Image: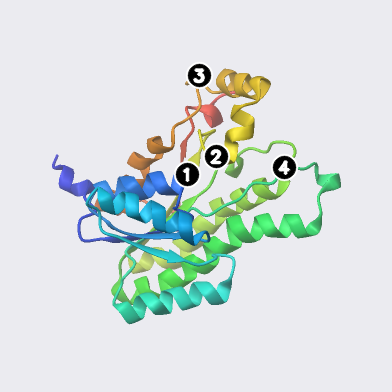
Amino acid sequence: MSTSLFSLAGKTALITGSSRGLGYSIAEGMAAAGARLLLNGVDEARLQASAAMLRERGYQVDAFAFDVCDEAAVVKAFESFDAQGIEVDILVNNAGVQYRKPMVELATEDWRRVIETNLTSAFVVGREAAKRMIPRQRGKVINIGSLTSELARATVAPYTVAKGGIRMLTRAMTAEWAAHNIQANAIGPGYMLTDMNQALIDNPSFDAWVKGRTPAGRWGKPEELVGTAIFLASEASNYVSGQIIYVDGGMVSVL
């Protein structure tokens, strides 16, 4: 079988929260598969530095600093894409935050912040992308879920609820957009070696728990999401929609 089935040549991919971490790894992988990148983040300096690193490798990269939690900023960004003739073929809703606190100590404002960043932003950015994809009758939406799209863990209630919502948002997108040849799917990463998880990685007891609980016996590497992301962004997944693929070393599959 030709690898051209997985090529992203000629496609433009917008990856939110892509100046570092999982988003950067996914962006780098998609660029290697031929995609033009639209990087996004809120830290302008870090975003431009990440874009420069990718350009040095010969990739076509543009950087757009806007807050995915600011609906007006999202709408303005897509209007800017329109004005520049940029068509988003692939959207990766990756931007997210974590906040650890027992529910009885959790302030409503912190609950809302996590839900807005991890779930509502995916709806808003997805909506704006789909408005443009529907007339073209093609598009790929990849939402980034989590193990907590499937399983709950103490002290991360808003994150768990948001990522569970991502699973159902993906299905809702499929219900409305699949008829327009737009495939919406999600990726559920396991415990990954990222800055967001650094405190857990450095905690000997938690590190031991992750390695003992994961059948693969280790943490995942951000670049290990790339193959799944390319599959879901490419023509290889044209009849796949509404699914969440867990890239977790087998954790959700076993007791």
> What amino acid does circle 1 point to?
Gly
Distance of mark 4 from mark 1, alpha carbons? Answer: 19 Å
- Relative to 219, residue 69 above or below: below
Q: Position of residue 31 (x, y in %)?
A: 28, 51
Q: Residues within 10 Å of mark 4 (few under 14, many from 20)?
A: few
Which badge, 4 or 3, comes first in the chain's sequence?
4
Distance of mark 2 from mark 3, alpha carbons? Answer: 20 Å
Front-lying residue, 36 or 216? 36
Q: Quadrant of the C terminus?
A: top right
Q: Quadrant of residue 135?
A: bottom left
Distance of mark 4 from mark 3, alpha carbons? Answer: 24 Å
Q: Residue at x 58, y 70 (%)?
A: 70
Q: Residues within 10 Å of mark 1 (few under 14, many from 20)?
A: some
> What amino acid does circle 2 point to?
Asp
CB under 8 Å between discs 2 and 4: no
On the image, numbered disc 1 is attached to which residue?
21
Numbered badge on residue 100: 4
Q: Residue at x 39, y 52 (%)?
A: 50
Q: Choose mark 4 or mark 3, whichever is in front.
A: 4
Q: Quadrant of residue 226?
A: top left
On the image, numbered disc 2 is attached to which residue?
195
CB under 8 Å between discs 2 and 1: yes
Front-lying residue, 26 or 89? 26
Q: Residue at x 14, y 39 (%)?
A: 1
On the image, numbered disc 3 is attached to which residue?
217
The figure's colour scheme reads rainbow
Distance of mark 2 from mark 1, alpha carbons? Answer: 7 Å
Which badge, 2 or 1, comes first in the chain's sequence?
1
- Relative to 212, residue 47 above or below: below
- Relative to 68, residue 225 above or below: above
